[in-house]
Image: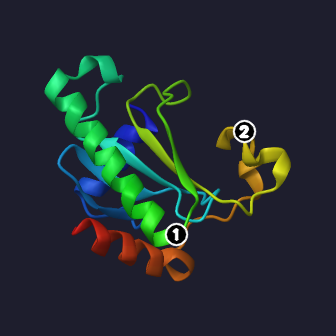
Amino acid sequence: MTLIHKFVEECQAGALERCIGRMESGWAVMGDPQVREGYCLLYPDPVPGHLNELSVEDRAQFFADMSRLGDAVLKCTGATRINYEILGNLEPALHAHVVPRFDTEMAEIRTKPIWMENWEISERFSLERHGELLERLRAELGL
């Protein structure tokens, strides 16, 4: 079992405080840490090992939900653009990263993948600090 499986179980149980809500293909959640304000993920439910295990229809739904989540993040954060990443190397279970990018980022990292950031010093998710954005995302998605 991966962390992705664990997080999906927590979403199903209503126990993951950073969960935005249930989309057709899975769960929209805010990332922890918030390496960028509004960083989110989409966890499929059920969780396959990778994208190629899904049917063509399920892939289309996952990508539609991912881009819909990206639309909400773009609108709610005022980001310049959204980067989408599906890696699965560390946690070998399908999940998508939805990363807002801003013109205010330091020049030396503005064009690099978010993984080049120092995640250790990024702000941890908390309802006190990020709850308002979570609620705006939830409202924007109609969840």
Q: Position of residue 106 (x, y in %)?
A: 82, 56
Q: Position of residue 46 (x, y in %)?
A: 22, 36
Relative to 45, residue 127 above or below: below
Name the element at disc 1.
helix
Quadrant (top left/top right/bottom left/bottom right) for the N terminus: top left
Q: Which amino acid does label 1 sit on?
A: Thr
* Within-10-Å neighbours for mark 1: few <14, some 14–19, many 20+: some
Instruction: Tell me, yes or no, whether the two marked residues, 1 and 2, touch with CB atoms within 8 Å.
Output: no
Location of residue 53 by image quarter: top left
Tell me the residue at 18%/22% (across/down).
56
Mark 1–mark 2 Cα distance, whole angstroms, equals: 20 Å
Location of residue 112 by image quarter: top right
* Residue hosting label 1: 77
107 relative to 120 in the view: left or right? right
Q: Which of marks 1 and 2 is nearer the N terminus?
A: 1
Tell me the residue at 44%/62% (across/down).
73
Q: Can residue 9 be seen in this view?
A: no
Q: Position of residue 11 (x, y in %)?
A: 29, 56
Q: Which amino acid does label 2 sit on?
A: Lys
Q: Can residue 87 be seen in this view?
A: yes
Tell me the residue at 37%/46% (across/down).
42
Q: Where is residue 117 in the image (x, y as percent from the top left)?
A: 75, 46
Q: How is the image coloured?
A: rainbow
Quadrant (top left/top right/bottom left/bottom right) for the C terminus: bottom left
Residue 112 shows which numbered tag?
A: 2
